[in-house]
Amino acid sequence: MNPLSLIAQDSIKKEVPKFSIGDTVRVHVRIQDGNKSRIQLYEGIVIAKKHGGINETFTVRRISHGVGVERVFPLHSPSVANVEIVREGKIRRAKLYYLRGKVGKAAKVKSKFN
């Protein structure tokens, strides 16, 4: 086996929940303030997942003060403390980039459990 893939498998140590595109998630992010650290929450809809393995990232979109804000998180980063699933979405696309052009109720994703 490739030595880089062995290192990648060893560095994936924490368990992450199985979430998919369209889910509403709450990401607990570690923020460094000087020599202190705190946890900040970021809640939104997962619109994309990219790459795989150790390099996997996911993009979370939310509306903040009427402006769409997207943030990309590395899944296996030490700065991502926890990812909790708030709601599962019912979608039929691999990427939800079309939500960028929608406003208000049109930007909603249907819930899996009605």
Image: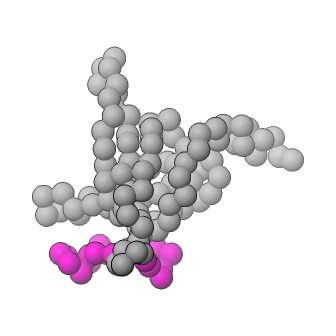
- Please tell me how many numbered marks the rendered image carries: 0
Q: Is residue 11 left or right of residue 63?
A: right
**Residue 14 screen position, x and y as percent:** 59, 39
Task: Where is residue 107? Give x, y as percent.
Answer: 26, 76
In the figure, residue 60 lies in which quadrant? Answer: bottom left
Tell me which corner region of the image, top left, top right, bottom left or bottom right, holds residue 36. top left
Image coordinates of residue 25 in percent, x first then y, are 38, 56
| Quarter of image, res 9 | top right
For residue 39, above or below residue 74: above
Say left or right for 39 vs 11.
Answer: left
The residue positioned 59% from the left and 59% from the top of the image is: 51
Magenta stretch encompasses residue 98: yes
Q: Residue at x 78, y 41 (%)?
A: 6
- Depth order, front residue of 87/114: 114
Query: In this picture, which residue range is highlighted in magenta?
Result: 90-109
Asked if residue 107 is among those painted magenta in the image, a careful observer would answer yes
Q: Residue at x 64, y 38 (%)?
A: 13
The C terminus: image quadrant = bottom left
Instruction: Check the image and name the residue furthest to the left.
Output: 65
